[in-house]
Amino acid sequence: MPINSLLASSGHQLLLVDDSPMNLDTLLATLGDSYDLRVAIDGQAALDLIAGGYRPDLILLDIMLPGMDGYDVCRILKADEKTSNIPIIFLTALDTDEDEAKGLVLGAVDYISKPFNPATVLCRVKTHLELKHHRDHLQVLVDAKTHELTEAYKDLKQVHTQMLQQEKMASIGQLAAGVAHEINNPTGFIGSNLNSLQKYIGKLNEGIAFMEQILKSVDDPEMAAQLKEMKRKLKFDFIQEDIDDLITESKEGIERIATIVRNLKSFSRAEDDTLKPTDLQNCLEGSLSVAWNEIKYKAKVEKNYQELPPVNCLPQQLSQVFVNLMVNAAQAIEDQGVITINTCHEKDWAVVEIGDNGSGIPPENLERIFEAFYTTKDVGKGTGLGLSICHDIIQKHQGTITVASKMGEGTRFTIKLPITAGELRATG
Ligand SMILES: Nc1ncnc2c1ncn2[C@@H]1O[C@H](COP(=O)(O)OP(=O)(O)OP(=O)(O)O)[C@@H](O)[C@H]1O
Ligand SMILES: [Mg+2]
């Protein structure tokens, strides 16, 4: 029988590494009926077979081989994680305790001295194959459990993040609703008083014009001169002209306050998960008024809004994204800077860019900024949740959020949203 023949058997693959034809013949006769056997007649040949992709279930390895000895073969196989779990049984004429100990220390599972009893070899091979089978099975179970636990941990972290997000949103919402409520009342009566005042001033002016007319018809030059002097002294003409402008400006101011109050109210209102066609520019304006307090002393805001069709989305959640990005932009500016807000339309996508010329983000931090709890801000200043929330919300909208940044030059976040999204993507 050729010594490197492949024999049909139980399906387990065994590699015999031995240079003695007599030993090989005995092993082939002992094991050939039960296992698929391959033979290597020196260490290098064994390593070559394995390097070519052959993965035996067990190796019977002689120690004294031409060239590299069995210990070295064992050392090389144990050092490589692809082959380290193949059980190796040393089969050798070296039979001192030291030889045996050396082989076992190197990671062999067993050591059989020559001349060997074929029944012993058969029994040990069977035992070690069974052990390997159980070990592999256990490893599969451990891997599956580890995977399960990792997934459960991820879910837990996600739920925790969402709870923090909800808490944060709820407290911002409460604050916004409280402020809106407090401002709403005085804004209302100032607005209505201004309207009345405008009407009254109109009537007063009419009355004054009428009285002047009557005085003119009396034809008393002295009284006319006194009237003229009084009007000059009190800057009457200027006041009459300016009073109208003052009231108009004040009414515009009140209108702006009313818009802010409306935005704050809509920001705080609980939102269900129903997509609504939304004017993103309105949404950006609302977010800007919420973030304005953070921005106004730090940055000039440059807007370039290109026409956008209504986008199917959850407007409050997108407002939350825009506010987070605007606040981050303002916080990245140390002294005075510029925040740019652009919108444009690319095929089926609405694109919103929020940029700043602040500190920029170091390249090594770029891949971490969307992680929950990643922050470079002082304790108490940043929770590190802002961008992770943005990422989740944009993902939910089937959109993308990307960042480009250069140290010392600034940062630009780009959001792309499908205009006609039909449904939300489940996250978590
Ligand atoms: N526009 C930006 N310019 C420079 N760095 C930024 C910018 N936006 C985000 N970062 C960096 O990314 C980190 C994470 O941002 P994120 O909004 O998630 O958290 P935060 O702002 O630190 O805290 P939070 O938003 O929870 O108050 C920030 O700490 C900051 O280092
Ligand atoms: Mg932030």
Image (cartoon, helix red, strand yellow):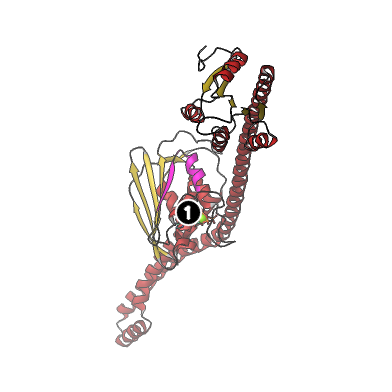
Q: Is residue 367 above or below residue 214?
A: above
Q: Tell me which amino acid carries mark 1.
A: Asn
In the drawing, does residue 88 fall left or right of residue 275?
right
Bounds of the magenta span? 390-404
Q: Is residue 276 above or below residue 363?
A: above
In the drawing, does residue 168 fall left or right of residue 46?
right
Q: What percent of the width, then of the height, locates residue 388?
A: 52, 48
- Tell which of 288 and 183 is nearer to you: 288
Asked whether mark 1 lies closer than 8 Å to ligand 1, one says yes
Q: Residues within 10 Å of mark 1 (few under 14, many from 20)?
A: few
In the drawing, does residue 33 fall left or right of residue 52?
right
The verdict on residue 392 being magenta is yes
Instruction: Name which quarter of the figure residue 241 lies in.
Output: bottom left
Q: What percent of the width, then of the height, locates residue 350?
A: 38, 43
- Tell which of 44 and 261 is nearer to you: 44
- Circle 1 SS class: helix
In the drawing, does residue 227 fall left or right of residue 372?
left
Q: Report which residue position mark 1 lands on.
A: 365
